[in-house]
Image: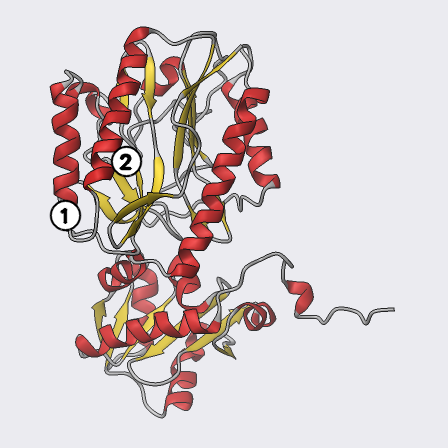
Amino acid sequence: MAPPATKLTNLLEPRARLVPAAEAEGRIGRLQAALRKQELDAALIVQNADLYYFSGSVQQAQLYVPAEGEATLFVRRTVERAIAESPLAVVPLPGVKHLRALVSERYGALPARVGLELDVLPVNAFRRYEKLLPAAAFADISSVIVALRAVKSAFEIELIGAAAAVADTVCARIPQILRAGLTEAEFAGKVEAEARALGHQGIIRMRAFNGEMFYGQLLTGVSGTVPTGLDTPLGGTGLSPAVAQGVSFKRIARDEPVVFDFVPVVNGYTADFTRMFVVGKLAAELQRAFAVALHIEHEVAAMAKPGVVCRALYDAALAIAADEGLAAEFMGHGPGQVRFIGHGVGLELDELPVLSANDLALAEGMVFALEPKFVLPGLGAIGIENTFCVRSDGIVALTTSPEVIYEVD
């Protein structure tokens, strides 16, 4: 008989991909170089996506990264899980008030200048750090972290590719699920069950304050024309004003667009993906808008390569939409129109690069979703979306399902 699994082994899903030690060391090394450049003594990392990126764990913890030397994961709970998950040194933290003494003991001195994630750190937490380290000056390192995370390693691209594969697999199963008469909520539940069985983690992380989403936006007919407060071209009514986005209890009708705007997340990493379905056949106006969306996608993809600024890609997309007489419907309509055509993906859904009127240049290793979409009042929404990785000579699609309108009998 085989010996029983150790306590630590039992804390891990056997198929989970852990962040390798070399991966974490490289990320922390790049952060330390940035800290030295800004003349900071250390950084304290606490936001979940950043915590996972640098430590490989999202236990209740404070990651202390000195400008020189070994980083330490001070863990409040659960210490055993953090040890099993993270390649870093893990030190138990009885409470945040003990952080000062533990840092002083472990590093021999307290930092004079400390970097914090001030774009996401609650004010109350910031005030706590002021009391813990009254002699320290604090600086915002959020832009540094976001920029570091924008360029993905081969390990990260592999994981995003695995998420993309889930989108492709679920997409192929939709013709067996979709039928007229289902409510959007019923249809979404069936689709989401397929994704969950394939390893979708359920949680979609976003950095933006109050950024929330559940699996994506699966909308049909005029539901796709309903705007929402979330910064996205497609909203939907949602099931109540408490959420105000996504599926409703509207029943799916024949000959109306079904938007499968799906966010697969596997092993922490996100892709983004949209395909169009219909029970029957779409109106000619919707088919034409879909053809324009494909044209925009292909033109932008052909332009995209390292060194090209986001503004150039955005302007090219707007120009095509205007030439086709669809500028008012491009990327939303009226108050729902947004000012971007794509966004970076990774541990969060809203990473860099954002394909908008900004001058950030693409770099090899960036991964982004390109999503030209149209919202036609009275008819519905239609478009395409794929996740792309920037290579040395251009971009390559990680989502590979056929770019067609899938007609279901």
Q: Which residue is mark 1?
A: 309
Q: Residue at x 21, y 44 (%)?
A: 304
**Quarter of the image where one finds residue 211:** top left
Residue positioned most to the right: 1
Q: Which residue is mark 2?
A: 231
Which amino acid, mark 2? Answer: Asp
What is the total number of numbered labels drawn onto the structure image? 2
Residue at (67, 67) in percent of width and height: 9
Q: Position of residue 350 (x, y in %)?
A: 31, 46
| Label 2 crowd bin: few (<14), some (14–19), many (20+), radius 10 Å | some
Is 273 positioned to the left or the right of 180 in the image? left
Quadrant of the frame with the C terminus: top right
One can see residue 357 in this view? no
- Residue in the picture at 24% in, 49% down: 353
Q: Amino acid at mark 1?
A: Val
Instruction: Give the x, y percent position of residue 218.
Output: 44, 26
Q: Quadrant of the N terminus?
A: bottom right
Instruction: Give the answer, above or below, for where 21 lies relative to 212.
Output: below
SS category of the residue bearing label 2? loop
Above or below 387: residue 185: above
Instruction: In the displayed orientation, state which residue is furthest to the bottom.
Output: 108
Residue 181 is at least partly visible in this image: yes
Q: 47 left or right of 141? A: right
Q: CA distance from mark 2 to mark 1?
A: 22 Å
